[in-house]
Image (cartoon, rainbow, N blue to C red):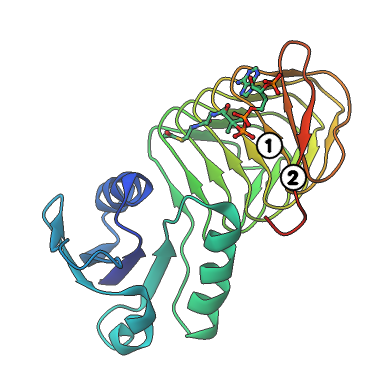
């Protein structure tokens, strides 16, 4: 047994802590969070700030980044790797994940999610509650597929994109990097990099400045 440090004690951190608890692989779980007043979440201690990461390496050999912002999550994932922590993949026991799929380090699959055969999920991705990723999809690093979103077969999604709650993507579609697909959208054609699309069918709503 060993220790798991969860980076970020917000909503995502809580869900991650519960999955880690259910998996039973760690004998202690703690958070790092920059809110000075926060001392405990769900019975797990908040033991320090994010910048203090390195000082906890002796007591916690694994770390998981639970930061909602996709770019920030990937950045911290890189830092956690450089610091030499093990980076687990956290899969809720009540999700359905094909043995023919692959899921990158630092990614999480929440309760009720389904990942079908030959889907590839990148590092630091979040497949949230009851979302589905169908066969032959490729999700690059740092993507968040929000609760109840549906990604049909053979869809490619670029780095750090956000598929918002309840949206759907038709099969054989390419979604660019740093894209936001708004809540409830139905995407039926390819989407370029750095845009927000919304509606049924989804149309371009605005551009997103590169790097945002
Ligand atoms: C466990 C969890 O909680 S995980 C988190 C889950 N959360 C989500 O999935 C977030 C869902 N949020 C949304 O969908 C939001 O609307 C966002 C993030 C897309 C808003 O993005 P923004 O770029 O800030 O959109 P903004 O408010 O500037 O709106 C831009 C335009 O898009 C429209 N728009 C925004 N969202 C939607 C939508 N879901 N459907 C249709 N149109 C929309 C706006 O009305 C506006 O239209 P207009 O230019 O014609 O007036």
Q: Secondary structure at mark 1?
A: strand
Q: Residues within 10 Å of mark 1 (few under 14, many from 20)?
A: many
Q: Nearer the viewer, residue 101 or 152?
A: 152
Q: Nearer the viewer, residue 181 or 1?
A: 181
Measured Cα–Cα span from mark 2 to mark 1 = 9 Å
Residue at 77% of width from left, 33% of height from top?
206
Residue 39 spot, x, y in % from top left: 13, 64
Q: Is mark 2 within 8 Å of ligand 1?
A: yes
Mark before the other along the chain sequence, 2 or 1: 1
Q: Is mark 1 within 8 Å of ligand 1?
A: yes
Residue 122 spot, x, y in % from top left: 66, 54
Q: Which residue is mark 1?
A: 180
Label of residue 208 in the image: 2
The answer to whether marks 2 and 1 mark residues whose Cβ atoms lie closer than 8 Å is: yes
Residue at 87% of width from left, 27% of height from top?
172
Label of residue 43 in the image: none
């Amino acid at each position: 047994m060993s220790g798991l440090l969860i980076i970020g004690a917000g909503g995502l951190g809580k869900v991650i802590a519960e999955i880690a608890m259910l998996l039973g692989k760690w004998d202690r779980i703690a958070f790092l969070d920059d809110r000075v007043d926060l001392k405990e979440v769900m019975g797990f201690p908040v033991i320090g700030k994010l910048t203090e990461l390195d000082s906890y390496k002796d007591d916690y050999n694994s770390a998981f980044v639970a930061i909602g912002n996709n770019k920030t999550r990937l950045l911290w994932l890189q830092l956690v790797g450089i610091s030499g922590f093990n980076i687990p993949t956290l899969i809720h026991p009540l999700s359905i994940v094909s043995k023919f799929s692959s899921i990158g380090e630092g990614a999480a699959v929440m309760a009720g999610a389904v990942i079908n055969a030959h889907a590839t999920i990148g590092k630091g991705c979040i497949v949230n509650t009851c979302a589905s990723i169908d066969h032959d999809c490729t999700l690059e690093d740092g993507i968040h597929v929000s609760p109840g979103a549906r990604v049909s077969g053979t869809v490619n999604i670029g780095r750090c994109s956000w598929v918002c709650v309840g949206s759907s993507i038709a099969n054989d579609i390419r979604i660019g990097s740093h894209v936001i697909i708004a809540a409830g959208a139905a995407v039926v054609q390819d989407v370029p990099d750095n845009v927000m699309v919304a509606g049924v069918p989804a149309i371009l709503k605005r551009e997103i400045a590169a790097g945002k």
